Image (spheres, rainbow, N blue to C red):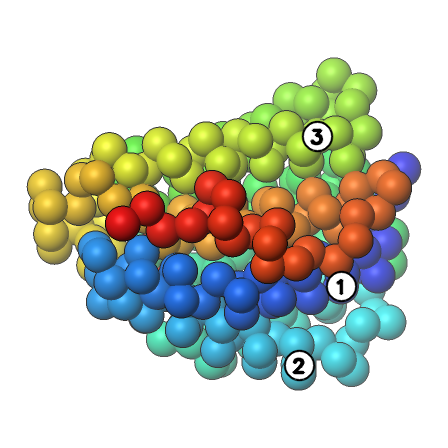
């Protein structure tokens, strides 16, 4: 099976909607261990993405993802926005000219995106960042595809790994980014960027689900595991 640009557009639109819904929640997570702007940054960035991708929705997957990344880099300050921008630009570069993307090529493109995030942010595993979600998630996706799973099943496993990685940031001490300034006081809080990266996998799973899932609603994201605990 192959993934179409239209499915990737659906992913980005779903992600923008979830970020808008979860803006306060993400900002609350960031207020606990950072400067309280992660939800605001990501929402500003993805509202810009929606505008910028409008003229390229019929183009190849590479153009779509690179346009997404450039919209983020151009509109969001701080650490998180530019790191997501790098992720999408690198993923898009790996998909240059492809109108249809083979399953393995999609996972390889996401891996290229993660590599860009690591090169730029220099985070190691367990530093309490988005890398703690993207790394195990993409490892799962690749492993499942190798076993012969469909892209939908591979992303389902990836999303489960992403959720586990997100929750596993809670007991960690932050070693990168603003949260690292807090030292031990960062322990006990879920990382905001890890949380937005979990949404990234989850919305991709929804966009590629077979049969397609309905558009996400706030009840599917809020009120279950995503409700702030304090
Ligand atoms: N060096 C880094 N490598 C990977 N991710 C990082 C790094 N620094 C910060 N992050 C991620 O960015 C998130 C914070 O994003 P955001 O609040 O938008 O930016 P800022 O920290 O500049 O306010 C963190 O929760 C973390 O997941
Ligand atoms: Mg912040």
Q: Residues within 10 Å of mark 3 (few under 14, many from 20)?
A: many
From the image, tell me which residue sits under label 1: 9
Secondary structure, mark 3, is: helix
Percent across and percent down for residue 23 are 45, 67
- Side of 150 where 39 appears, left or right: left
Res. 165 image quadrant: top left
Q: Contact (CB < 8 A) between labels 3 and 1?
A: no
Which residue is located at x 36 percent, y 75 percent? 77
Left or right: where 161 falls relative to 64: left
Give the vertical position of 141 relative to 208 (above or below).
above
Q: CA distance from mark 2 to mark 1?
A: 12 Å
Splitting the image into 4 quarters, where does residue 202 fall? top right
Q: Position of residue 82 (x, y in %)?
A: 42, 66
Residue 44 drawn above or below residue 103: below
Q: Nearer the viewer, residue 44 or 5?
A: 44
From the image, which quarter does the N terminus lie in? Answer: top right
- Crowding around mark 1 (Cα neighbors within 10 Å: few <14, some 14 to 19, many 20+) is many
Upstream in sequence: badge 3 or badge 2? 2
Sequence-first tag of 3 and 1? 1
Q: Which label was assigned to residue 154?
A: 3
Residue 115 showing in the rendered view: no
Cβ atoms at labels 3 and 2 below 8 Å apart: no
Q: Residue at x 27, y 49 (%)?
A: 230
Identify residue for label 2: 52
Of the pair 141 and 38, the residue shown nearer to us: 38
């Amino acid at each position: 099976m192959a993934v179409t640009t239209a499915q990737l557009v659906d992913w980005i639109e779903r992600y923008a909607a979830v970020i808008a819904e979860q803006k306060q929640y993400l900002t609350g997570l960031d207020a606990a261990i950072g400067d309280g702007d992660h939800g605001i940054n990501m929402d500003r960035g993805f509202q810009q993405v929606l505008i910028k991708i409008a003229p390229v929705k019929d183009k190849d997957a590479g153009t779509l993802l690179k346009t997404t990344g450039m919209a983020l880099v151009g509109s969001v300050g701080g650490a998180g926005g530019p790191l997501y921008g790098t992720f999408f630009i690198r993923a898009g570069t790996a998909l240059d000219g492809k109108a249809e993307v083979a399953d393995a090529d999609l996972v390889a493109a996401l891996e290229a995106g993660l590599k860009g995030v690591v090169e730029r942010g220099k985070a190691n595993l367990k530093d309490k960042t988005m890398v703690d979600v993207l790394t195990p998630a993409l490892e799962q996706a690749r492993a499942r595809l190798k076993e012969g799973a469909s892209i939908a099943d591979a992303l389902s496993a990836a999303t489960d790994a992403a959720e586990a990685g997100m929750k596993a940031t809670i007991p960690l001490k932050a070693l990168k980014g603003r949260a690292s300034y807090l030292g031990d006081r960062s322990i006990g809080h879920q990382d905001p960027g890890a949380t937005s990266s979990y949404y990234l996998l989850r919305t991709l799973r929804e966009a590629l689900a077979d049969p397609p899932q309905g558009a996400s609603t706030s009840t599917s994201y809020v009120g279950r595991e995503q409700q702030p605990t304090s």
